[in-house]
Structure formats: structure tokens, C-alpha cells
Image: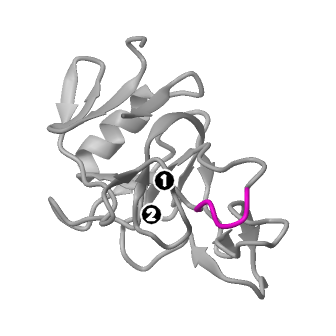
Amino acid sequence: MTPNDMVLTPTGLRFQGRRYACSIGKGGLTHDKREGDGATPRGVHRLVGMLYRPDRIPAPSAWAQPIGTGDLWSDASGQPDYNHRVHVPYPHSHEALRRADPLYDLVILTDWNWPEAEAGRGSAIFIHQWRRPGYPTEGCIAFARDDLHEIAARVGPATRLIIR
């Protein structure tokens, strides 16, 4: 492990000398992630991108990319663009990146099942804002807004997310 690693522990996420409260998937942690199981995949994950809503927040870091009005994320298992950012019109199953609620105002992308996605292994494993403390996600890791913004300002492509 390095000082730049984020490590999920039973009491929160440890990163750069701090411990942050977080939520994980409603299906708990798993070594056998499947699309729709609600579980957070165990392993060592790289951070491969950061997206933000430019109409709501300033760019949180130099490597962050804006979320456009037509941006989606494919969860269409079996499609060639499964677990990738796509744009409208997109006829297959997907998740909107530009949401009415603030959950995806800032999104950190992980390399879970990416870039060469295996059908059915799960998609859209992100780091994002939580609904409220303790409320589970669909497999992502979620934080309080202020904590997420603090983390986003400190992470980079060399940061790893370790989920044991």
C-alpha cells in the first residue's frame, strides 16, 4: 500500500491520514460481482476518470471532465459499449449521468470491469455522493458531499481504491 491508496475498512474509508464515513452496496461486498446484484466488488481498483456537473459545481480537479446533457452510462450487458460512457440517443439499457438529484454532481470512475467489460460482471461502479448517511448504493461507494469534494481534490490517476 501507498499513502495515496484509499482503503475501505469496516469503519469507513481510510485515505491520507483521515477516515471518511461512507456507504457501500446494498448487497455488501463480493468477490463475484454480477450486474444488478447491488454488491460492491472487492479488489484493487484504479481511478480512471472524474466527471462533474459544470452547471452545479466548479471543476474539482484538472483531470475532471464535464458531464454533458446527453451523457449516459451503458449497463446493457452484451453490448459492445457495456460499462462505458455513451450519449443520447442510446437505445439500450443505461443510467443517466446528468441526474435531477445531486448524487452524480461529482463522480469518480473506477476500472471495475473496464475498459474491456465482460458481459454480466457489473457496470457503473463509481465513487459519488450519498443520499444520506448509511443509505446503501447499488454497488458504488458513496460519501457526504463535503467529504467527496475533499477526496476528489486529492486523488489522481495513481490513486488506488482497495476493497478487501
Position of 7 compared to 36: left or right?
Answer: left
Callout 2 touching callout 1 (CB < 8 Å): yes
Point 63% across, 48% down: residue: 65
In the rendered image, residue 112, in percent from the top left (x then y), is placed at: 59, 47
> In this picture, is 33 found above or below 154?
below
Is 120 in the magenta? yes
Magenta-colored segment: predominant secondary structure: loop
> In this picture, is 158 found above or below 109?
above
* Quadrant position of the C terminus in the picture: top left
Kind of residue at disc 1: Phe
Residue furthest toward the right?
80
Between 109 and 139, the one nearer to me in the picture: 139
Mark count: 2
- Please state which of the two labelled residues, at mark 2 or mark 1, is closer to the viewer: 1
Number of the label disc, if any, that sits on residue 159: none
**Separation of marks 2 and 1 at Cα, in angstroms:** 9 Å
Point 62% across, 43% down: residue: 111
Point 50% across, 53% down: residue: 32
Residue furthest toward the bottom?
91
Q: Quadrant of residue 21?
A: top left
Say which residue label 2 marks.
Answer: 104
In the rendered image, residue 75, in percent from the top left (x then y), is placed at: 64, 72
- The range drawn in magenta is 118-122
SS type, badge 1: strand
SS type, badge 2: loop
Say which residue label 1 marks.
Answer: 126
Kind of residue at disc 2: Tyr
